[in-house]
Image (cartoon, coloured by chain):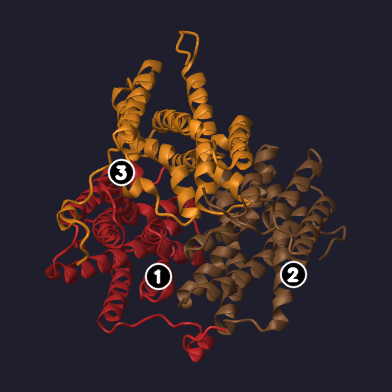
Chain colours: A orange, B red, C brown
Amino acid sequence: MRHSGGVSTADLLLALDLLGTFAFALNGAFTAVRAVRLDIVGVLALGIVTAIGGGLVRDVLIGAVPPAAFQCWPYLAVSTAGALIAFFVARPSRLLLRPIIVLDAVGLAFFCVAGAQKSLEYGLAPAAAIILGVITAVGGGTIRDMLIGRVPSILTNDLYAIPALAGATIAVVVAPAEILAVPTAVIAAAVCFVIRMVGVKYKVNAPIPPRLLREDGSDG
Amino acid sequence: MRHSGGVSTADLLLALDLLGTFAFALNGAFTAVRAVRLDIVGVLALGIVTAIGGGLVRDVLIGAVPPAAFQCWPYLAVSTAGALIAFFVARPSRLLLRPIIVLDAVGLAFFCVAGAQKSLEYGLAPAAAIILGVITAVGGGTIRDMLIGRVPSILTNDLYAIPALAGATIAVVVAPAEILAVPTAVIAAAVCFVIRMVGVKYKVNAPIPPRLLREDGSDG
Amino acid sequence: MRHSGGVSTADLLLALDLLGTFAFALNGAFTAVRAVRLDIVGVLALGIVTAIGGGLVRDVLIGAVPPAAFQCWPYLAVSTAGALIAFFVARPSRLLLRPIIVLDAVGLAFFCVAGAQKSLEYGLAPAAAIILGVITAVGGGTIRDMLIGRVPSILTNDLYAIPALAGATIAVVVAPAEILAVPTAVIAAAVCFVIRMVGVKYKVNAPIPPRLLREDGSDG
């Protein structure tokens, strides 16, 4: 990642979005292929939806239409490329599983920060910008899971939305009044990335309702 | 409910929205917890989605972005509060079941009227404003059901959309050309509330296709 | 179909949209009734969603809000009519199956072209306009399938999105710089229609991931 003085915030946001877009399309299409028997339309559509879906929802909600993913061709190009790779590979070898998880965490970290910062730029209040940062990061995967008939894993047990919440919160709270500084973005993304990777390594799940915990699976 | 002369329509609409928002978040999160094993992210997300989802869809469709729920912090605050209560309680005691149904009907009544009136204010035609009122009232629960993998009950047998349709229709048809009067809102909401409660008490369902009725479950 | 010199592009686009809207509502509601036991709210909602859902998503994404379907009453009227017919008929006789498939293909052909052309008019880039044309054509059916808990057939094996992609691509690529000519629309729609009907007749499916093909159903 470049963070020399010559890189503007706009450059950084674009780089964040494109790298995250590719990683999400690849991982999203792999996940979809594993879950449901899809044709090429399904693999491409679900890869692209995973990659740009969260940003589309964010842009529609903040009034930034047409959305960035439709105005700037590299988004569609890199997400199509990621989904096409998944179509031809279908099942990643075990050697690739770890890099894909890491790359996906990079995408998560970049998306939550970029989404929160763009929302601030469009005049959203801090609480809304944090939520929109999380939506940017997890929205595409959620739409993919709805399309393939799965309850989105972010709702049930994954430590996936919480790191995004942490990253978006830091990006919003630390952001100076006028300048969305590059260092803030880097720190916020790093915190999200680390929490996510710790969650993956130690299989940490988000807490479940305390009363259900006590009942431990019994159904009243 | 205040309906003294000193309360503007804007005040009334805000009060309608906030009360409905809390009721929907509470009931929506309870419904989600009963249906699927969720973690805290899931309970909060589904409670908030149930509460503000219909209004988000309405605001996006009428061009009122950023949506009211993201511009006015009390919406997020009361919906988060309702969902948090559901997270810690998990299963409401039997004593609470009736109050929750009543509160939810209050939310339904307020949402369909507020949604229709806001759509009229944004220049939508009457037929569209009625539909948008119904979407405001039932949209959040529909999105929640899609997320937890259930066919939304409003599509299959509940008398839930029809009272909302009645309330929104009265709000739109009776609305004077220029002034969205408070009495109209109160009457429209009351009609919706009464139909909903009658439906709950006598277990009235919406009609099903006549031919399926005759076949009575046989599948051709 | 009229294509005399006196018909403006706007007239043609309206005619395309209305005919497609009726066909989609009818077919969409029939499909929903076959899949799930619905009440009148469900049949109407799913018919209307199938008919106008793709256009709503397109209009929200290109910033054309309120969407055309809410500003021009014939859209809601014809989609309600189509869904009501499906409610009272419930199961079309075998004699009607072929006309319904043909009518649906007509709708598919008209929607992908109208959607792509409207997106161009709103200043979208060619690649985005093509995708938005496809979304216009297949978006409503996809939302319906999500609502009734099915994995959308366009993602798994139907040759449904690919003809829409062909039609939208021709409409975008052949469109002269300034004038969206009627002949282009007719040719693009005809290509989409023919591909779709050939796919139906010869049961052509879209290709599936090559590696899954070799494994032929075994699950690693």
Chain containing mark 2: C
For the point 52% across and 25% down, the residue is: A14
Percent x, y of residue A168: 34, 31
Residue at (35, 60) in percent of width and height: B114
Tell me the number on the disc at residue B154. 1
| Image position of B119 with respect to A69: above or below | below
Q: Secondary structure at mark 3?
A: loop
Per the rendering, the mark at residue C114 is none
Q: Residue C202 location in percent, x, y?
A: 78, 64
Q: Amino acid at mark 1?
A: Ile
**Location of residue A80 with respect to C82 vertically, above or below:** above
- Quadrant position of residue B110: bottom left
Would you say residue B64 is visible in this rendering?
A: no
How far across and down, in percent of the image, does residue A122 sit? Answer: 43, 32
User: Which residue does the numbered mark 2 point to in the structure image?
Assistant: C102
Q: Viewer-proximal residue, B20 or B143? A: B143
Going from the N terminus, do you reach mark 1 or mark 3 first?
A: 3
Q: Amino acid at mark 3?
A: Cys
Q: Residues within 10 Å of mark 1 (few under 14, many from 20)?
A: many
Q: Which residue is the site of mark 3? A: B72
The structure residue drawn at horizontal position 47% and vertical position 29%, both measured from the top left corner, is A99
The amino acid type of the residue labelled 2 equals: Val
